[in-house]
Amino acid sequence: MEVTKAVIPAAGFGTRFLPVTKAQPKEMMPVLDKPTIQYVVEEAIAAGIEDILIITGRGKQAIERHFDKSYELEEALEAAGKTDRLNRVEEIADLGDIHYVRQKEREGLGDAVRYAEKHVGENPFALLLGDTIIESDTPCTQTLIEHAEAHDVSTLSLERVPWAQVSSYGVADADIDDDTDLTDESFPVSDFIEKPAREDAPSNLAITGRYIFTAEIFDALDATEKGVGGELQLTDAIRKLTDIRGVELTGDRYDIGTIPSWLRANIEMSLQYDDGEMNAAVEEFLQERFR
């Protein structure tokens, strides 16, 4: 088993960000000085994957334009002697071999993943949600690949969330105690429950938006009925897989799914940003605002 392809779904409406997402894809919402989806693509590249398929939809052309070469802009930056900015713009177009396919009907994440079958064929692939940033010393996707290739099964990244929040996630059923040290370990997962009530949750290990799938996922999707909201739920298909393992997330996860979480990502990441100027500006503002 060798993972060489990545799939990034980015076809949703992003209704929680309206009206800004009326004309701009949610995945293009900026976090610091880059759109969210660029962080996701860079994670796949850092994990050693250069063949990337982005699942888009109507009104998502800005994503393709962002990763395309911009001759006029590059010429203007070069003429102005803005070498640093020119280099950053050129690097975007050279990130990897990026392909696109359009999801014709928005019928859920599971349906979006089905559009990747022709591109990945019988090969295993990484799935990275286009609105989730994960910052860690070792790319989350790289860690998943290592465990998936070692065990030759589909593998998911999981994160311990507060018990009060389990009803917002797909939650893993695994025979693990709350205090079990899972550092650098993977473990079998027997089932998943989508957005359980607190009293029904088998654990507080939640799906985080990073997966490695074998081609078995496509058969599972074909055998899955539409669920909540009339959409094809990826979690329902995952439950049909023969074997699956989980890896507990290390690092920081930023779900750019709501305005509060997007604001939090900008603030927290700016405080960690190692350029001095941005870090200092945000720290100064916070100190002035809350002293």
Image (spheres, rainbow, N blue to C red):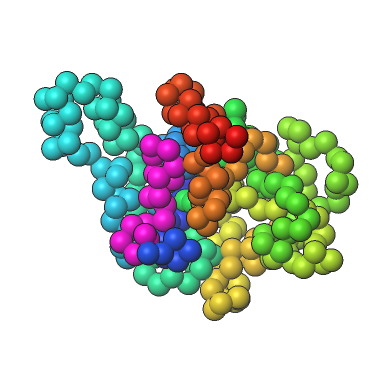
In the depicted structure, whether residue 86 falls above or below residue 225: above
In the depicted structure, whether residue 229 falls above or below residue 236: below
Q: Position of residue 215 (x, y in %)?
A: 56, 55
Number of dots carrying numbers: 0
Q: Position of residue 283 (x, y in %)?
A: 53, 30
Task: Name the residue located 66 percent from the left edge and 53 percent from the top edge.
Answer: 207
In the depicted structure, whether residue 60 falls above or below residue 72: below
Q: Nearer the viewer, residue 269 or 28?
A: 269
**Image quadrant containing the N terminus:** top right
Q: Is residue 34 magenta?
A: yes
Write down the quadrant of residue 55 in the picture.
bottom left
Segment colored magenta: 20-37
Task: Name the residue located 79 percent from the left edge and 37 percent from the top edge.
Answer: 182
Q: Nearer the viewer, residue 194 or 80?
A: 80
Task: Name the residue located 45 percent from the left edge and 66 percent from the top edge.
Answer: 15
Q: Position of residue 142 (x, y in %)?
A: 57, 35
Q: Nearer the viewer, residue 98 or 17?
A: 17
Residue 77 as seen in the image, left or right of residue 211: left
**Image quadrant containing the C terminus:** top right
Question: Can the viewer see residue 54?
Answer: yes
Q: Is residue 200 magenta?
A: no
Q: Residue furthest bottom?
A: 230
Question: Can the viewer see residue 129?
Answer: no
Residue 205 as seen in the image, left or right of residue 4: right
Q: Position of residue 228 (x, y in %)?
A: 60, 75
Residue 187 as seen in the image, left or right of residue 23: right
In the depicted structure, whether residue 254 falls above or below residue 220: above
